[in-house]
Image: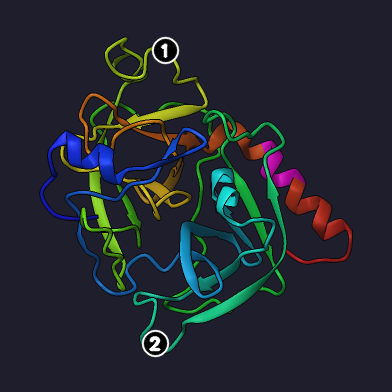
Amino acid sequence: MGLSPAPVLALLLLGATVDGQPRGRILGGRKADPHVMPYMASLQLDGQHICGGFLIAEQWVLSAAHCTEETDGKTFQVLLGAHSLTKPEPHKRLYRVRVQIPHPGSNIHNNKDDLLLLQLEEKAELNEHVQVLPFQREDRDVAADTVCKVAGWGTTSHSGHRPDELHSLERPVISRDVCNHRTRHDHTITEKMMCTDSRKKDTCKGDSGGPLVCNGVAEGVVTAGSRVCGNYKKPAIYTRIAPYVAWIDSVMASAAGEGDTR
């Protein structure tokens, strides 16, 4: 979440792609008030923030499957209770991950089924800074122009500076028809996806996997869209959660059946 947008050329130069997926930054956001989003998680490798995520049950974090592209076979660790990634904070704790399960329909070539479930080694310690975020279970579209919030630790400037503290951004939902216009995402946005306006304010690298929160409920997960960040002609793409409730529930129930707790 950063400052004013650079010219498109600069964005293209800095938003390098991996397997066709962009790597950019949030634009136009601001530093979040500390711990007002106690559900936020930082997915980390070797102590470095890679992606966002959020706590959906005491032992489960939801994120984006594309985040595993950068793991090279390693398993994430999950930081909960953080506002700052580096400073001491009373309820900040790094959890080991028992298993990470990408949706079986996900792949590196497109945004299809871009969800990732991570089971923590133990239940998270819930407190004022660590809370579960309810997610949408009713399969209906969020009305256009609804203002939703997204947050993350993604890079904040075109020089690649990564913030130490959580940043947040509010964006209006745009209709699937508008998002699918041939000058925008040209009919690639399915009923399992949703979009928000990206004019000068947007999500990108390091923010994938974070929740799009509308009226206090997680409606979508930030995906790695094939777009230039901050370009109004390429709206931000999210994977809607409601169509995947049965998969989420079955994964968590299966683990519980094996003797683990939710």
Q: Residue 206, how many percent across, how many down?
A: 40, 55
Q: Quadrant of residue 220?
A: top left
User: In the figure, 13 relative to 46: above or below?
Assistant: above
Going 78% across and 52% down the picture, which residue do you hit? Answer: 253
Q: Amino acid at mark 1?
A: His
Q: Residue beneath label 1, please?
A: 187
Crowd tier of the residue under label 1, counting other residues whose Cα lies within 10 Å: few below 14, some 14–19, many 20 or above:
some
- Horizontally, residue 134 falls left or right of residue 166, namely right
Q: Residue 225, how many percent across, how many down?
A: 41, 34
Is residue 198 at all visible to an observer of this figure?
A: yes
In the foreground, 180 or 90? 180
Crowd tier of the residue under label 2, counting other residues whose Cα lies within 10 Å: few below 14, some 14–19, many 20 or above:
few
Q: Amino acid at mark 2?
A: Glu
User: In the figure, 176 relative to 22: above or below?
Assistant: above
In the foreground, 152 or 213? 152
The numbered mark, 1 or 2, whose residue comes first in the sequence reads: 2
Going 74% across and 53% down the picture, which residue do you hit? Answer: 252
Q: Residue 159, how many percent across, how many down?
A: 22, 58
Dominant secondary structure (helix, strand or loop) of the stretch shown in magenta: helix
The magenta span reads: 246-250
Q: Residue beneath label 2, please?
A: 89
Based on the picture, tell me whether residue 247 belongs to the magenta stretch.
yes
State the residue lying farthest toward the right. Answer: 258
Q: Residue 200, how many percent across, how many down?
A: 15, 40
Which quadrant is the N terminus positioned in?
bottom left
Mark 1, secondary structure of its residue: loop
